[in-house]
Amino acid sequence: MTALLEVRDLHLRFGGVKAVDGLSFEVREGEILAVIGPNGAGKTSAFNCISGFYRPTSGSISFDGRSIMRVLPSTITRRGMARTFQNLRLFKEMTVLDNVKTAMHANLREGIFDNLLHTPRYLRAEEACAREARGWLDFVGFEGDEQLFVTQLPYGEQRRVEIARALATSPKLLLLDEPAAGLNYGEKQGLMRLIRKIRDLGVGIVLIEHDMGLVMELAERIVVLNYGKEIADGTPAEIKANPIVIEAYLGAEDEEAAIDDTTLTQSVPIAADDERKGEQA
Ligand SMILES: Nc1ncnc2c1ncn2[C@@H]1O[C@H](COP(=O)(O)OP(=O)(O)OP(=O)(O)O)[C@@H](O)[C@H]1O
């Protein structure tokens, strides 16, 4: 099967900092790929290049058979790539339903007069849009009040709404930046079920995540970055047993230690989750 996303020899520099230093990987339709690495390894920078927010220094990125180098984020979204952010980026002054509807407005056909005069065409389009948005809220398991402002929701529910909004763009590929950050155990289990359900729609998924228990259980393939460089690419079992990965996470002195889900999970500062929760508050 041909790759949905192909990243080849990607480089991104910030002055003297090599944030991404020769990254190459592929994602196929309906595949769950995780990108992991210690803090500052270049994961979010790579996401920002792929989704068009940063212009790479060199390399190539193609999506669905076409280059997306120097393509605007909004065009990349229209071509079928959606993403969520490390720190939620919902419209705080909008309701849950309106947040999801915004993802579909780019595809609405009504003109300025329809909008101003609220013509039957406008009303029909808005109703269809609301129906589809409700469908996505249902799909992600949102059971709250769609008319609440998003900031009135618990953090885990806000994450679901953000994923619903990304899905409302009808993506072929979904990039999730630390979707489990700030979630409790039960919410993480729900998130894993949701990600598998999205994969079952045939959507390719690239996941940046620090929770190694979740990554090892969910990902079919894992790419490991350290100081911008790709140090490993393999199945969860291969990654767990890779001495270079163990060294990157635990330091050379612990190289002897067997790497298991718990070890890697514990290598992630728990405070990071709490800090992010704090940012949202
Ligand atoms: N806008 C920027 N300007 C300058 N340097 C940056 C910028 N964004 C990231 N960097 C640097 O690039 C490197 C990679 O950062 P990046 O945020 O991509 O890492 P990360 O793996 O996503 O980290 P984390 O897990 O902590 O989110 C770091 O050294 C970081 O300081």
Image (cartoon, rainbow, N blue to C red):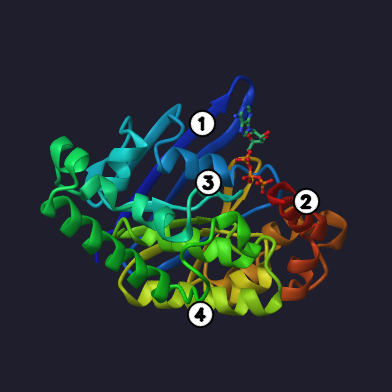
Q: Amino acid at mark 3?
A: Glu
Instruction: Look at the numbered discs 3 and 4 and tell me whether their residues touch, using CB distance below 8 Å.
Output: no
Secondary structure beneath dot 1 equals strand
- Would you name the residue on which mark 2 appears? 275
Name the N-terminal-most of marks 1 and 4.
1
Secondary structure beneath dot 2 equals helix
For ligand 1, which image quadrant applies? top right
Query: x%, y% of residue 99?
Result: 43, 53
In 3D space, how far apart are the residues under numbered discs 4 and 2 (Cα atoms)?
26 Å
Q: Nearer the viewer, residue 48 or 219?
A: 48
Name the N-terminal-most of marks 3 and 2.
3
In 3D space, how far apart are the residues under numbered discs 1 and 3 (Cα atoms)?
34 Å
Q: Residues within 10 Å of mark 2 (few under 14, many from 20)?
A: few
- Would you name the residue on which mark 1 appears? 12
Residue drawn at x 44%, y 52% as measured from the top left: 83
Name the N-terminal-most of marks 1 and 3.
1
Name the N-terminal-most of marks 3 and 4.
3
Secondary structure beneath dot 4 equals helix
- Would you name the residue on which mark 4 appears? 193
- Would you name the residue on which mark 3 appears? 93
Q: Amino acid at mark 4?
A: Arg
